Amino acid sequence: MAKAAPADTVENDPLRSISDAMRDAIHNASEDAHRARERVKEAGAGMGQSVSRFTYTSSYMLSYGLVYATVFVARSIPQENPIVEGLIDGGRAAIEALNEAKSKPTEAA
């Protein structure tokens, strides 16, 4: 009578199955990590543009709102009163002082 084959052949070796499973898991993990790196690179470029666009839009809306509100209030105040005349004269004086400061040569220390 022929001897029966051992129960732990190469195909049925539990350690072999575990090592194959670990090899496959490592391979899949490295592929997933590579895909994740590519997605992060793509998202990084898009995120920079999104942040830039958000900053621009926010600044635009803030400045537009402030200027519009200021002009609206300024137009609603009657022109012939001491407050408006003082604001106009003060604005002109500030512009003249700024122009003089720009035209002066800077003094070297």
Image (spheres, rainbow, N blue to C red):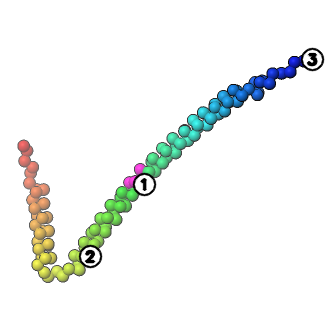
Q: Which of the two residues, 17 or 92, is positioned nearer the viewer here?
A: 17
Return the mark for residue 72: 2
Query: Mark 1: few, some, or many residues within 10 Å (few <14, many ≥20)?
Result: few
Q: Tags 2 and 3 in contact by the CB under 8 Å rule?
A: no
Q: Quadrant of residue 83?
A: bottom left
Q: Label 1: which residue?
A: 50
Look at the image and tell me in which quarter the N terminus lies: top right
Q: Amino acid at mark 1?
A: Ser
Q: In the shown orientation, is residue 13 left or right of residue 36?
A: right
**In the rendered structure, which segment of residues is drawn in magenta?**
48-52
3D distance between C-alphas at marks 1 and 2: 32 Å
Comes first in the chain, label 3 or label 1: 3
- What secondary structure do most residues of the magenta stretch adopt? helix
Say whether residue 49 is magenta. yes
- Crowding around mark 2 (Cα neighbors within 10 Å: few <14, some 14 to 19, many 20+) is few
88 vs 11: above or below: below
> Toward which corner of the image does residue 76 lie, by quadrant?
bottom left
Circles 3, 1 touching at the beta carbon (< 8 Å): no
* Residue found at x 63% / y 31%: 22
- The answer to whether residue 14 is above or below residue 69 is above
Amino acid at pointer 2: Phe
Residue at the outermost right position: 1
